[in-house]
């Protein structure tokens, strides 16, 4: 017989490993206790445990809010009390700083330039504030965190959205220049909503990228000369311009049949006209081309959603370029300076999705996948290796995959089916072969992403497409059976998706400000968790394959026009991150046995000041158990400081960037099961990880009768 509760019972232990993520389907007794029944703003860590997610912050190229620092200027006494936001100037050294907090005998400054010196008078403008004295104020861990957040807010106020109206239409990063440097570009409708403007992030904020002009030509002829190159001067009669890009679309220069377009600066002193006279080119000898008329301004029509792919079709390091489409305009190529519309000859010429396979550029035109010739993104005729592949279903995305040991494959997703394209060319050796899956698997627009495998969202949930042992074949599987009810609620709300390769996550963003983060390490699904953000996502930077320094920066574009950098800072662009997780019920290995709870030992991992609450519920929340009401504890605080700044009730260490600590709390009450809730809410607490929780208890009698 079990020992009575009043006897001297032996302390037992039940370890709850925080693993598995959200599960809304599996019956309680079949589900390990460390799975989550409910959560917001936690993610499944790639190394184990549940991590409170990092924040995000607005971005325009100026200093990031998360990089803000502060200093303390302590004074003898206020002669005049300054206001937050004022600039404090050292009367002796002329050092300056912006005041972000005013306390009884000190001020907190950020954006400090120079050195504020003890003994010097401090002023705001011409107003005396007081004389600086040696600092005696001790910064507690919470003050360090709060003042850092205030400094971040001051930096944040400087950062703006690209000028324009409505949602941000697209955001992408491209390595440009020599040596290459990552630059971030934003696409947004102009103030009148009549066209899309392109902006580049800079040290002074968003800077407009001007578009050039395009002029068509036919019968390009060498005539003993050479093919004109980017950067040459094109001249027709008295008028000339600089050629920014030679867009050779068809024909032969040597045969006198070359045709295409030139991307040019504004002709001066006058506009081009239809030939004759033919155009000539500096540095190209006797080469000529017949112009078809005046140059026209390159524009992008408003209202689309941009999707990007970074690729190098030209072999040289300088050939890395951004390719984009939005379902409204022609596909385009962009090198950071020159935007080149790409004409495919399709009507309407407005692809919605973009991809690359075997060095061919692909565009999705309704149910047709149309591609360029190999390594010639401007040439789309069959003569040059271009072709059209009919899929029988509206295309919703592309994913390049390894199809065999010698050749790639292209997954072509539709609304109701998935097709695999094999081969290396449209004809001849290696000709394309299209294979259709019969499983009824498709994808929702903007959900297709690729890590090692391809991932997408479809009606049943998140689909993983992986290569199987037999090269050239693929096996699809659904990952999210355990959150099927959530998927059904969210799937029609999908706005966009992104991959975080550092955290091994596939992320889905929905129009109701929520997101779903799935953690997948080396192809193994570790679990998913729901996020609730402060901003609605419209687009993502799905061009992260071109970082020159392994830069993991990820961006989202919001419906109100901001570019936000993900996984940065301690807040949602200054707003509080409210986060909680609620575990499954733990029977401690013996269901229907009453236990007396003694204490819990929580294993947490963190690197800076954190603060959260722990609460628990007993016996499935039954009202028949006196102690079953949720019991909350005061915030459990942990930090990393030096021993000489040790404060009782705070867990303190010095050194190290990441560490674990057992946090013990007393438990009270009796019940056959226990579940825990961990929560936090602030805009200054850094991310932390909950790894496991050990319940100490005494085992008692069996339960009798019905509740």
Image (cartoon, grey):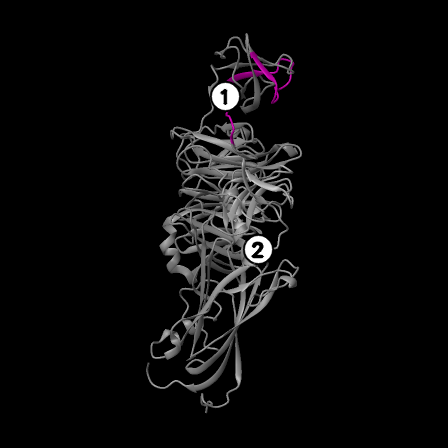
Residue 382 badge: none
Quarter of the image with the N terminus in it: bottom left
Across and down, in percent, residue 418 comes to 45, 48
Tell me which label, 2 or 1, sits earlier in the chain.
1
**Crowd class of label 2 (few under 14; some 14 to 19; many from 20; radius 10 Å):** few
Q: Nearer the viewer, residue 527 or 414?
A: 527
**Crowd class of label 1 (few under 14; some 14 to 19; many from 20; radius 10 Å):** many
User: Where does the magenta region start and end?
Assistant: 207-235
Which residue occupies 63% across, 63% down?
653
> Helix, strand or loop at disc 2?
loop
> How far, Cα to Cα, is label 2 from label 1?
49 Å
Residue 545 visible here: no
Residue 511 visible here: yes
* Residue carrying label 2: 470
The vertical placement of 550 against 517, above or below, is above
Q: Nearer the viewer, residue 433 or 346?
A: 346
* Residue carrying label 1: 214
């Amino acid at each position: 017989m079990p020992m009575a509760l009043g006897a001297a019972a032996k302390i037992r232990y039940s370890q709850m490993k925080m693993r598995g993520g959200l599960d809304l389907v599996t019956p309680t007794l079949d589900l390990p206790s460390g799975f989550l029944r409910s959560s917001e703003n936690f993610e499944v860590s790639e190394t184990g445990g549940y991590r409170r997610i990092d924040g995000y912050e607005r971005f325009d190229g100026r200093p990031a809010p998360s990089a803000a620092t502060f200093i303390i200027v302590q004074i003898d006494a206020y002669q005049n009390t300054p206001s937050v936001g004022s600039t404090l100037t050292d009367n002796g050294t002329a050092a300056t700083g912006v005041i972000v907090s005013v306390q009884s005998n000190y001020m907190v400054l950020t954006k400090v330039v120079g050195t504020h010196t003890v003994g010097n008078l401090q002023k705001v403008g011409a107003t005396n504030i007081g004389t600086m004295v040696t600092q005696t104020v001790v910064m507690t861990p919470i003050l360090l965190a709060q003042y850092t957040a205030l400094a971040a807010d001051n930096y944040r106020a400087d950062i703006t959205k690209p000028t324009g109206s409505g949602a941000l239409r697209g955001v992408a990063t491209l390595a440009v220049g020599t040596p290459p440097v990552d630059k971030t570009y934003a696409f947004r409708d102009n103030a009148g909503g009549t066209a899309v403007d392109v902006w580049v992030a800079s040290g002074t904020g968003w800077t407009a990228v001007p578009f050039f002009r395009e002029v068509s030509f036919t019968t390009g002829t060498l005539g003993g000369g050479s093919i004109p190159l980017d950067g040459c001067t094109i001249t027709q009669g008295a008028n000339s311009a600089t050629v920014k890009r030679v867009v050779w679309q068809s024909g032969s220069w040597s045969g006198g049949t070359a045709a295409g377009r030139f991307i040019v600066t504004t002709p001066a002193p006058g506009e081009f006209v239809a030939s004759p006279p033919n155009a000539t080119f500096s540095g190209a000898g006797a080469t000529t081309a017949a112009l078809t008329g005046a140059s026209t301004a390159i524009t992008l029509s408003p209202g689309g959603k941009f999707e990007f792919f970074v690729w190098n079709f030209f072999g040289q390091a300088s050939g890395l370029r951004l390719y984009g489409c939005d379902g409204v305009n022609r596909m385009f190529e962009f090198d950071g300076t020159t935007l080149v519309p790409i004409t495919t000859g399709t009507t309407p010429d407005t692809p919605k999705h973009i991809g690359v396979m075997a060095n061919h550029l692909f565009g999705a035109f309704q149910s047709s996948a149309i591609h360029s010739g190999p390594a010639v993104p401007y040439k789309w005729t069959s003569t040059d290796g271009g072709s059209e592949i009919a899929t029988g279903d509206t295309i919703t995305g592309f994913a390049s995959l390894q199809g065999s040991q010698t050749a790639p494959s292209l997954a072509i997703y539709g609304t109701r089916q998935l097709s695999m394209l094999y081969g290396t060319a449209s004809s001849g050796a290696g000709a394309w072969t299209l294979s259709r899956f019969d499983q009824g698997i498709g994808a929702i627009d903007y959900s297709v992403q690729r890590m090692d495998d391809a991932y997408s969202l479809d009606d049943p949930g998140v689909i993983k497409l992986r290569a199987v042992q037999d090269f050239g074949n693929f096996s699809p599987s659904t990952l999210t059976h355990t959150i099927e009810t959530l998927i059904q609620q969210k799937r029609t709300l999908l706005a966009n998706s992104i991959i975080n390769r550092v955290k091994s996550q596939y992320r889905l963003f929905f129009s109701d400000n929520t997101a779903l983060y799935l953690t997948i390490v080396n192809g193994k699904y570790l679990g998913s968790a729901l996020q609730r953000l402060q901003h609605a996502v419209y687009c993502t930077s799905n061009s992260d394959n071109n970082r020159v320094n392994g830069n993991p920066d990820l961006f989202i574009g919001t419906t109100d026009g901001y570019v936000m950098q993900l996984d940065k800072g301690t807040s949602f662009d200054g707003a509080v991150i409210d986060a909680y997780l609620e575990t499954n019920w733990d029977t401690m290995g013996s269901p229907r046995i009453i236990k007396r709870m003694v204490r819990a030992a929580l294993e947490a991992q963190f690197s800076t000041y954190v603060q959260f609450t722990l609460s628990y519920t007993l016996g499935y929340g039954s009202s028949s158990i006196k102690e079953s009401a949720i019991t909350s504890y005061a915030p459990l605080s942990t930090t990393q400081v030096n021993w000489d700044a040790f404060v009782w009730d705070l867990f303190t260490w010095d050194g190290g960037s990441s560490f674990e600590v057992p946090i013990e709390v007393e438990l009270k009450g009796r019940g056959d099961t226990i579940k825990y809730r961990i929560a936090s809410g602030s805009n200054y607490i850094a991310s932390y990880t909950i790894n496991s929780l050990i319940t100490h208890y005494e085992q008692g009698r069996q339960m009798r009768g019905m509740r």
